[in-house]
Amino acid sequence: RRGGRFVLHHGIDARTHAIEAFTATRFDELEVGPDEPFPYCGKQPLGDCLAERAIELVGRHLETAVREPQNLDAREGMSLAALLAGLAFSNNAVAAVHGLEYPVGGLVHVSHGAGNGLFLPAVMKFILPARVPELIRIAELLGEDLVGLDGNAAANRAIIAVERIRRAIGIPEHLSELGVKRDQLPELARKTHAITRLMLLTPRRPSEIDLLQILEECF
């Protein structure tokens, strides 16, 4: 049981790392000066290769590894997924999902993986207009049937798949489950918006109002 919980929180974190790396602001679209210190280089081909493989492995192994923590094939698959996802975001970036999780984690001390897993679908919905091809690819990697679907509908299947996996492994779906109060949401939005590096790396740049709306959706 404890092994399954370990895989759950670290596995959902790996999935978030890979998806944020794959959908981040492109390296040649970052609004950062060439000589300005910056922790990430933005979305680029090497990181994308790593992220795609990590997403595929998570889709194949995460649910099994959580339900059957003694299944060594699933555990091995998730170990590789976590490694590749870490390499992917180290080369590309993380973005608004992490920006939202940081202040929430500090407030209610939820695990980093659970917080990321809670916010990931809502952020994917927000960035969908800017990342339709990437979300379609994520849906394919997660095994979704996209036959007959147009661009936005196919991209939305990535979000549906992520929500289904989240529900199947028991990640909280609402901030209220974690002890967050509604009157705390504006301050959480303000703190998130102040994490400039992660806002720059979000391909559809969120305003503070956008972030508050995401928090409300997740409440």
Image (spheres, helix red, strand yellow):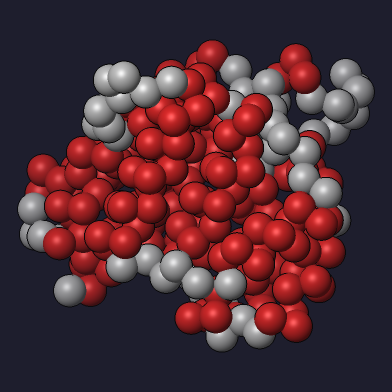
The number of numbered discs placed on residues in the rendered structure image is 0
Residue name at image x 68 percent, y 21 percent: 26
Residue 24, by quadrant, is: top right
Left or right: residue 79 compared with residue 91: left
Left or right: residue 159 compared with residue 184: left
Left or right: residue 174 compared with residue 127: left
Instruction: From this view, report whether residue 60 is shown above or below residue 176.
Output: above
Residue 215, by quadrant, is: bottom right
Q: Nearer the viewer, residue 19 or 212?
A: 212
Residue name at image x 40 percent, y 37 percent: 158
Instruction: From this view, report whether residue 137 is shown above or below residue 56.
Output: above
Q: At which x and y percent is residue 211?
A: 74, 56
Instruction: From this view, report whether residue 162 is shown above or below residue 93.
Output: below
Left or right: residue 72 compared with residue 129: left
- Which quarter shows the C terminus? bottom right
Residue 29, by quadrant, is: top right
Residue name at image x 11 percent, y 60 percent: 68
Q: At which x and y percent is residue 76?
A: 19, 43
Q: At which x and y percent is residue 144?
A: 27, 32
Residue name at image x 71 percent, y 20 percent: 27
Q: Nearer the viewer, residue 126 or 73?
A: 126
Instruction: From this view, report whether residue 208 is shown above or below residue 161.
Output: below
Q: Is residue 1 visible?
A: yes
Q: At which x and y percent is residue 98?
A: 62, 53
Q: Is residue 89 visible?
A: no
- Which quarter shows the N terminus? bottom left
